[in-house]
Image: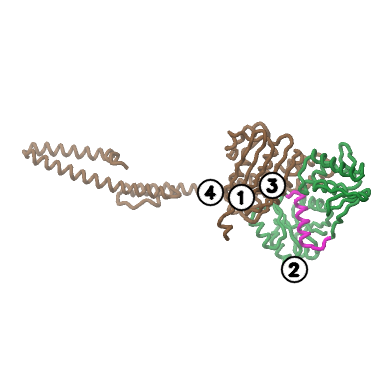
Amino acid sequence: MRLIDFLKDKFLLILLHIFCMCTLGIFLHVTGYSFSNLILIEIFWLLILGTWLLVTYIQRYCYFRQIEQTLDRMDQRYLLGEMLPDSYRLEDKLYREMIRKSNKSVIEKIHQIEDEKKDYREYIESWVHEIKMPITSIALTCENRRRSNVEEFRTIGLENQKIENYVDMALYYARSDEVYKDYLISETDLQEVVYEVLAKNQGYLIQNQVQAEVDCPDLVYTDKKWIAFILNQMILNSIKYRGDTPMFKFYTTKQEQGVLLALEDNGTGIGESELARIFEKGFTGSNGRSHERATGMGLYLCRKLCQKLGIEVWAESIIGKGTRMILDFPISSYLSKL
Amino acid sequence: MYILVIEDEPVIRKELKILLENALYQVTALEDFDSVAEQVIRKKPDLVLLDLNLPDVTGFDICTEIREQSEIPIIFLTGRTDSMDELTGMLKGGDDYITKPYQAPILLARIAAVLKRTRISETKESTVLTCHGVHLDLVHTCLEYGEKRVDLSKNELKILHYLFQHAGEIVPRLDMIEHLWENQVFIDDNTLSVNVTRIREKLKSIGVTRLIETKRGMGYRV
């Protein structure tokens, strides 16, 4: 609050005073007061008015400063109504009451939305668990008839697996905000996780003539399930944007600060201009448009989950040569001290 | 090996039974879910596959009941992918926890792993396979024919092992590749051809010709 603004706000009051001073001056002059006395009275009047304005200004300034500071420090600003300082002024009291009421309705609205969101998330989770039953039935049925040399069962099996993956994405997306509820951090053998993800996509990979090399001897501390999901997304991407003789390499490198897990492919690669954006939500890029339809959700989810797990993820790529996705598992200095 | 399947979803139950029977296990699937624990104890299986969501009762409770009387290995099967559930499963005495939809190879591998862990005395597979006078030594990873021998690479050994196990049959290329993938050799069709050619050369060097036949459009046969 600047002084000039304050004075502008008090413009009417000042005008009234000036008017009164003039009227008094004319009245005193007419009734025969000497000019010097008149000036003295007017100066006193001005002095009192000035002091009064200054004191009010300082008071108001402090009051609003306090509110601003409170607001800056607050995490949830819509709760301001509860934090407003006491004031003897009627206007302040009225405003405070009104802000409180308005805040209350905001809070109610927020709670309602949170509840709805929770309900929705819970519904998605239970829906996913239900849909997994028929998916399992189909998978088993196809598996049992796979050797009967009926090509259709292989195809159905593969398509079923795509459904499974999309369903999983929905589940992980629904859960990604509350990862902490679903952690099980343990010593994880990355080799085992990679094997599992490869086995899961075996049919799809073989169909696309993929070769793979796995060399991941290093152990990390993380949640196996989430890492498997992240790797799964990356493998599916690598298959989608594969080259002529697809070759996937998985390897870990131990570093002072942690372990790096890399997935290298020799696919179409990603242009430099797009590389920075591939983890954004809904970003499909030129590859996504020219190949199979991309949703732009896979890598976005990967990055989101990685952030929650404390893993850094990035990509390196040369167009036409391939892409390398890297996951950086930090070794917490706190953990290693224990 | 006798496996008891406790699963309330009829289609999954039926297919699971077929899958396990194809994998040469003896299987019973429970269809009546009253006093499951008692039935389990009575049937004395080598392994129990237990679904978590059963009518009226959860798999965890059944597991607890079984554990009071027996140490039968139990694998939980569930559609829930919750870490808390997994942890509870382990604390209740489950030996493994597999989430639906399970991939058949993974399921079978996990069952085999649990059985292996719980039964130390398992009949050992013979380490030398013989076919048409050619010996495949799995321990020393080599081929022997008469006095001569030649070393094999890991991939070549796995290819020959599968062919020798199915001696006389035509092994489709896709089956072969799937088998290799299940054994952590991730190769494609062309590389399989390259490997087979290399095996043929090695066989030639010890004086064996025409051991592996190529059936055009079908696969290989030993």
Q: Is residue A37 visible?
A: yes
**Label 2: few (<14), some (14–19) or many (≥20) C-alpha neighbours in 10 Å:** few
Q: CA distance from mark 1 to mark 4?
A: 42 Å
In-front residue for pair B11/A247: A247
Please report, as a chain letter, where disc 4 is located: A
Q: Image check: A248 left or right of A9?
A: right
Q: CA distance from mark 2 to mark 1?
A: 49 Å
Amino acid type at image mark 1? Gln
| Residue topped by disc 3 | A131
Q: Quadrant of the N terminus of chain A?
A: top left
The circle on residue A117 is: none
| Residue topped by disc 1 | A255
Amino acid type at image mark 4? Glu
Task: Identify whether B5 is placed above or below A244.
Answer: below
Q: Quadrant of the C terminus of chain A?
A: bottom right
| Residue topped by disc 4 | A114
Residues indicated by labels 3 and 2 sit on the same polypeptide chain: no
In-front residue for pair B187/A50: B187
**Residue B71 falls in image quadrant:** bottom right
Give the magenta-colored segment's residue range. Answer: B102-122
Task: Identify whether A207 is placed above or below A136.
Answer: above
